[in-house]
Image (cartoon, rainbow, N blue to C red):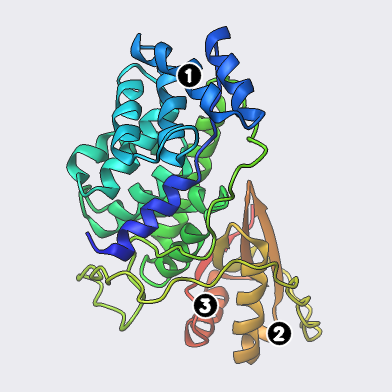
Amino acid sequence: MATRHKAAIAALLAATALPWGANAGVQDGVEAWQSGDYARAVAEWQPLAETGDPDAQFNLGQAYKLGRGVPQDMERARDLFGQAARRGHLQAEANYGLILFQDGNREEAMPYIIRAANRGEPRAQYIYGTALFNGDHAPRDWPRAYAMMTNAAAAGLPQASASLERMDGFIPLEQREEGTAMAERMAADSAATQVAVASPPPAPTARPAPTGTFTPVPVPAPAASPPASTPPPASPPQTRPAPAMTAAAPPPPPPPAPAPVARSGDWRIQLGSFRERARAESLWRSVSGRSSTLASLQPYLVRAGPYTRLQAGPFQTRAEAQRACSAATRAGSECITVRRR
């Protein structure tokens, strides 16, 4: 695996929960960890890990992964995560799959990653979504890939947001709509079945996950659009790391639209569905500025769960809406006609 590709998974692996405990012995180590006494935390967890306590195995794995209280040793961390994963520790299962993937053992890693992704673990969703998109170690399934990447982006993974934008350039609108609906169902199912566990408080000296070295796993960057029957090839990882995430100024408000022609009717056109409202507003500013037909319409930002659908209209007939869709296509947007219920 290329060095930059490993760095992307390492960045994901860094964004893991700090140790936590469910029994008194493990909790003593957690309290030592919180106070910065990592050596004592390790001393508390070591004997419990040797007797098979999965919480202690997970926490000790974290200590070896981070190099706190013990020398940093990713092989030892991997072994401890694997032991805890085989005893049903869900956080350990996700970490174990990611380390295996990072080390190039992808076939062995994918079952762990898939189970974690289906439970709603965002780092695993990012990896699984990429695999589904490229048809690499998973059957190609663009709607499910879009759903996985949508939820990973919603959880705050910046590399997932970047990959989602590139997917927009390849996946047809109808499949993106299917993926968006699937993401909503997945998020609801994950919330309904969430296992109640103690939230791990951060250690006082916890190091933030790196934000300036993400190199996405190979979701392809759009070049020339491939024929509909030919899947896009996976591009190599980026040659430069993404810039550090900084607090950006809020986007300017959309310019006032021209006074729309008085219209009525139940038909509209829909130009996309977005997790971030700002992306819908940005698309409308772009396409309405390139088409006088669209500029004369009334835009609608329709909430659908956590998503914002960009629509415009209204129209008396579907034929009128289809003509507006043709104008939207010429302006560079995909478009479908919808009937307001």
Q: Relative to 174, does residue 195 appear above or below in the rendering?
A: above
Give the quarter of the image for residue 107: top left
Q: CA distance from mark 2 to mark 3?
A: 13 Å
Q: Relative to 200, does residue 237 appear above or below in the rendering?
A: below
Please state which of the two labelled residues, at mark 1 or mark 2, is closer to the viewer: 1
Looking at the rendered structure, the kind of residue marked 3 is Cys
Measured from the top left, where is residue 298 in percent x and y?
Answer: 73, 74
Q: At 40% across and 76% down in the image, what residue appears?
A: 240
Q: Relative to 121, does residue 268 appear above or below in the rendering?
A: below
Looking at marks 3 and 1 on the same chain, the residue that comes earlier in the sequence is marked by: 1
Q: Nearer the viewer, residue 99 or 297?
A: 99
Give the quarter of the image for residue 284: bottom right
Q: At 73% across and 74% down in the image, what residue appears?
A: 251
Measured from the top left, where is residue 202 in percent x and y?
Answer: 64, 35
Q: Nearer the viewer, residue 113 or 92?
A: 92
Q: Is residue 12 left or right of residue 132?
A: right
Looking at the rendered structure, the kind of residue marked 1 is Ala
Mark 3 lies on a secondary structure that is helix
Q: CA distance from mark 1 to mark 2?
A: 70 Å
Query: In this figure, which residue is indicated by the disc labeled 3?
Result: 325
Query: In this figure, which residue is indicated by the disc labeled 1?
Result: 43
Q: Is residue 240 left or right of residue 299?
A: left
Residue count near mark 3 (Cα–Cα under 10 Å), binned few <14, some 14–19, many ≥20: many
Query: In this figure, which residue is indicated by the disc labeled 2?
Result: 296
Measured from the top left, where is residue 30 in percent x and y?
Answer: 59, 22
Looking at marks 1 and 2 on the same chain, the residue that comes earlier in the sequence is marked by: 1
Mark 1 lies on a secondary structure that is helix
Measured from the top left, where is residue 27 in percent x and y?
Answer: 58, 15
Residue count near mark 1 (Cα–Cα under 10 Å), binned few <14, some 14–19, many ≥20: some
Q: At 63% across and 35% down in the image, what residue appears?
A: 203
Q: Relative to 129, does residue 323 appear above or below in the rendering?
A: below
Looking at the rendered structure, the kind of residue marked 2 is Ser
